[in-house]
Structures are given as C-alpha cells and as structure tokens.
Amino acid sequence: MEEVRPMEEYLQVIPSELDIMKQEFKRKNLKLEKKIEKLEEEKMYLSLDVDLQKKEVEKVRKEKRKVEEDRDDLKEDYKKAQWQKEVQEKKARAEYWEKKFQEMRSQNLTLEKENKGLKTKLEAQEDCFKEELHQVKGQVRDKDYIIGEAIAQIREIAEYVRDLAVRADASSMMYESASDKGRELALLLDKVRTLGVGAKAYM
C-alpha cells in the first residue's frame, strides 16, 4: 500500500498528456488572443490611419478643387480683364476717332463759313467787276463812237486836203513866178500836195 500510494501521488504530480495539451492550448490560445488583440489594435490604428488618410485625401481633394476653382476664377478674371482691356481699347479708339471726327467737322464748318464769306466776297467783287465792265464797255462804246466820229471827220478832212492838193497842183501851174510871193505860194501848194499824199492813208 505504501508503494502504491506514492505512485498515485506521483501520477497526480505528473501531468497527463491531456493536461499538457490543455496547457499548451491555453498557452497558444493566450498567445493567439494577445496576437488577435494586437492585430485588433493595429487594425484600429490602421482604421484610424485609413480615416486620417481618407481625411487627408478628402482635404487634398478639397484643396485641389479649391485650387482648380481658384484657377478657373483666375482664368475667368483674366478673360474679364482681357475683355475689359479690349473694351477700353475699343472705347479709347472710338473716343479718338470721335474726337477726330468732331475736329474735322469743326474744321469743315469753319471752312464752310470761310468759303461762304469768300463766296459772298467773290460775288460782291464779281458784281463790282460786272458793273465796272459795264461802265468800261459803255466808255469803250462812247470812245468807239468818238473815234468813229473822229475817223469820219479825219476822212472828210483828208478828202478836203486831197481836193486842196488837186487844186494846188492845178494852181501851181498858174502861179509860177520868180517873185517871193510866187515862190511862197509854190511852197505852200507843194506842202498841200504832200499833205494830200499823206491824206490818202486815212481814206
């Protein structure tokens, strides 16, 4: 009995294979649980990281959208600035040409006034010239009449002188004398004949 008892005690002290397996299972299970807890913790951290990453991505997306919107706004502002610049340039050109047009119009009005004044002056001068021409024509007609009358009288005188020359030629034969009076008469008759020759040009 004494030998049997220690064996039982020994058997009680020595764990059985099942107990070993149980202990090993517990140990592994505990290890796995710790690993699972660690994985869960890592999963939680990863999920947190994922959330952070998502937030970062969303933040980056928002910033990207904002940058794109700002870029679009800048493009729109640039287009508006370009359009306003073109409008201002067109307006400036239109104002420049309007100013030139007004200046030319003012110059044209001034020239028209000057032309009108010159036309009036020219018309007055023309009327004056016409009046003077009319007077000159009248004077010419009067002078022509006087000259005609003078020519007629000259012709009459020339005919008379020619008749005198003919008579003088005939009388010179009758009054030839050696006396002084006869010679003077002959010279006078000779001058009359000369005048008669010259009078032919006026007949």
Image (cartoon, grey):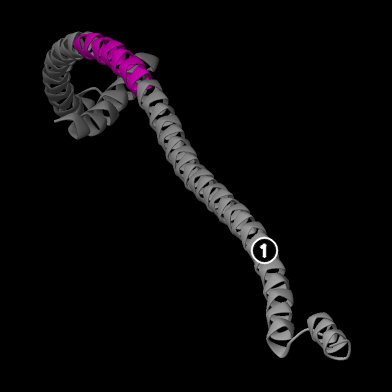
Figure check: 130 above or below 81? above
Who's the residue at 48% across and 39% down the image? Answer: 77
Mark 1 Cα within 10 Å, few/some/many (few <14, many 20+)? few
Say what amino acid the circle numbered 1 marks: Glu
91 or 120, which is in the foreground?
91
Q: Is residue 84 left or right of residue 192?
A: right
Q: Is 20 part of what is drawn in magenta? A: no
What is the span of residues highlighted in magenta in the rendered image?
105-127
Q: Position of residue 156 (x, y in %)?
A: 11, 19
Q: Position of residue 72 (x, y in %)?
A: 47, 47
Q: Main secondary structure of the magenta part?
A: helix
The answer to whether residue 14 is left or right of residue 163 is right
Residue 116 lies in the magenta-colored region: yes
Is 131 displayed left or right of 109 in the figure? left
Residue at image location 31% in from the left, 25% down from the top: 191
Q: Nearer the viewer, residue 163 or 153?
A: 153
Q: Nearer the viewer, residue 133 or 146?
A: 133
Q: Residue furthest front?
A: 1
Q: Position of residue 181 (x, y in %)?
A: 35, 14
Quadrant of the snapshot with the C terminus: top left
Residue marked by disc 1: 37
